[in-house]
Image (cartoon, coloured by chain):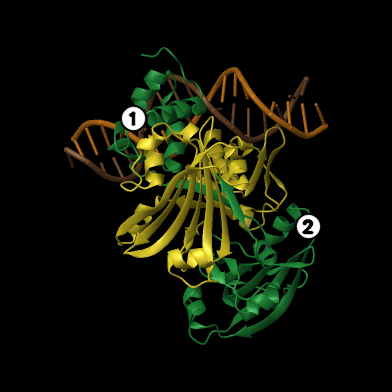
Chain colours: A green, B yellow, C orange, D brown
DNA sequence: CAGTGGTCTAGACCACAAG
DNA sequence: TTGTGGTCTAGACCACTGG
């Protein structure tokens, strides 16, 4: 018995972290039950639960009913990324934001897009190509497909005034999304639009968002050279 | 009064989400206090708190003591990324993992590395260059600097047996890290090591990890063409 | 079936920040 | 100063799942 008391869940969490790091509790080993810990720490079980839940969410602990809690064998760290609206991202750096719609038309999408959007062959979607600029310089090139079946009032949207992303966020409730981050090599088209050299490495985000019934939109964002995404643990 | 009751925090959260999406509660508006909601929903305030805390963490609500809770004006979505150990990432795809140390020596780092590691001019760090392979093919090229002051027993580490990342995870407790994701263009060196064309776009992760007192290590990971990082909301 | 984590409650006090 | 979210408690019941 230590005699020390850990009254806040942060204190409990810190102490548990210390024991994991000091190898007092080794990877793969079971740690004491919540009830035991609450006695040892001199706090309520709910407090222990709060502390351990956080560590489980960040991947350091593995918890299962009936089985118990063990130190994760393969600590898969979880980092959280902020996905801001592009305009806020740019304005947040103190730069001016502008965007222009390069193309807007209904079209039958290529098969990879159709597969992602889960639409029927022959269905026409809205295809939108946009360039976002920071201080007048190309920042990101956006190639987007929107499913008209998922979006009411789409034809009346003025994407020159408000970017598609912002308009959609404001008009269409969405439930989930998936993101893929990768790199590509600038071709002639990207080099021209982004005003960079052909053959430069570019950062790419592919994103789809959906609501209950539909895939709403799929977009590829190709960033100008130098773009970085940053996060901390 | 609806008469409906929302007894679980998930149910409360779903109802709150519904009201946000239906614009019943508009962006920027204050929503009722926890106490009011707990009465309306027929549950304890703690349950409401649990529900709202989750929404605040994911960026949909903005909560402040004394001020209250409002619907976020600029919904900055938070995505969580899994940062696995490379070996597990490769083995998880059913491929075989192998790595080889291309170079290992003590050296005075260039100034950008020294700045990141916060070491004194003239301090010598361990510089380690490694290639990780999946099914025998280059997967990621790793250029790492390790601070000997932060790592006991560094000279006895066998990085040929266990990759530096795994060795460090197992031997050095760390508190935090930061990540930068970007793209680069393959130069002659990268093209040769990764067996790709010069000029190809490559995905890059720069990572630093630290413990209480020191920056432990800084590493640049350059992935072979085709690498993708994926996440969902 | 039984043990463990998951959650709910009612009430209390605390910490922070807006006015 | 005071209102609001943040947290703790003691106890209870539930849900999942391992044995």
Do labels 1 and 2 touch, CB within 8 Å? no
Task: Residue B7 in the image: state x and y as whole percent.
Answer: 48, 42
B155 on left or right of A138: left
Residue placed most toward the observer, B188 or B136: B188
Task: Residue A16 in the image: state x and y as whole percent.
Answer: 42, 28
Choose top left, top right, bottom left or bottom right for residue A109: bottom right
Mark 1 lies on residue? A25
Q: Residues within 10 Å of mark 2 (few under 14, many from 20)?
A: some
Label of residue A207 in the image: none
Secondary element type, mark 1: loop
Mark 2 lies on residue? A95
A221 on left or right of A94: left
Looking at the rendered image, the quarter that the N terminus of chain B falls into is top right
Residue placed most toward the observer, B25 or A1: A1
Secondary element type, mark 2: loop
Residue placed most toward the observer, C11 or D19: D19
Q: Chain of mark 1?
A: A
């Amino acid at each position: 018995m230590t005699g020390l008391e850990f009254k806040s869940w942060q204190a409990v969490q810190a102490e548990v972290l210390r024991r994991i790091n000091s190898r007092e509790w080794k990877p793969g080993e079971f740690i004491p039950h919540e009830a035991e810990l609450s006695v040892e720490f001199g706090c309520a079980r709910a407090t222990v639960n709060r502390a351990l839940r956080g560590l489980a969410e960040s991947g350091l602990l593995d918890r299962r009913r009936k089985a118990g809690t063990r130190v994760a064998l393969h600590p898969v760290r979880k980092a959280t990324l902020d996905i801001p609206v592009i305009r806020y991202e740019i304005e947040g750096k103190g730069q001016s934001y502008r965007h222009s719609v390069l193309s807007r038309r209904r079209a039958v999408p290529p098969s990879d897009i159709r597969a992602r959007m889960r639409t029927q062959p022959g269905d026409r979607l809205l295809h939108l190509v946009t360039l976002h600029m920071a201080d007048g310089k190309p920042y990101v090139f956006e190639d987007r497909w929107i499913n008209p079946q998922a979006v009411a009032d789409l034809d009346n949207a003025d994407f020159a005034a408000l970017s598609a992303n912002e308009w959609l966020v404001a008009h269409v409730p969405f439930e989930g999304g998936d993101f893929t981050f990768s790199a590509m090599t600038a071709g002639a088209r990207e080099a021209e639009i982004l005003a960079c050299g052909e053959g430069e490495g570019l950062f790419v985000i592919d994103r789809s968002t959906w609501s209950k019934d539909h895939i709403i939109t799929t977009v590829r964002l190709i960033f100008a050279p130098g773009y970085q995404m940053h996060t901390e643990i």
